[in-house]
Image (cartoon, rainbow, N blue to C red):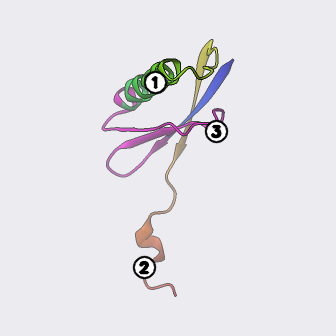
Amino acid sequence: MIITVILEQMPHNWCAHTPDLQDSIIATGKTRNAVIQNFRDAMLDLFDYKREQGQEVPEVTALEFRETREVETLETYAGVA
């Protein structure tokens, strides 16, 4: 199974998440490389936990990274009722 990971560059850090897994995995990091490593670590920790609980773990064969840039921030909506 190939997992698509969405990387988002925010004003002060990066965020990563995937729409491909039933369980939510979200990671942040100061750099692109840091967020990728943090995402991998979080995914492996989740899979270890699921194995310990006797739950099914998907067989991930690759991670496909796609980048987006933050277009709007919360400040964009300041003053909008």
- On the image, the x and y values in percent for residue 5 come to 57, 31
Q: How many marks?
A: 3
Residue that appears at 39% across and 32% down: 35
Q: Which residue is mark 3?
A: 19
- On the image, the x and y values in percent for residue 1 come to 69, 17
Q: Which residue is mark 1?
A: 49
Judging depth in this view, the residue of 66 and 35 nearest the camera is 35
* 74 over 59 or under it: above or below: below
Mark number displayed over residue 78: 2
| Helix, strand or loop at mark 2 | loop
Can residue 21 be found in the magenta stretch? yes
- Magenta-colored span: 8-34
Left or right relative to 32: residue 47? right
Mark number displayed over residue 37: none
Q: Earlier in the sequence, mark 2 or mark 3?
A: 3
What is the quadrant of residue 15 in the picture?
Answer: top left
Q: CA distance from mark 1 to mark 2?
A: 41 Å
| Helix, strand or loop at mark 1 | helix
Pointer 3 local density, CA inside 10 Å: few below 14, some 14–19, many at least 20: few
Residue that appears at 39% across and 23% down: 41
Residue that appears at 38% across and 28% down: 38
* 54 over 12 or under it: above or below: above
Judging depth in this view, the residue of 74 and 46 nearest the camera is 46
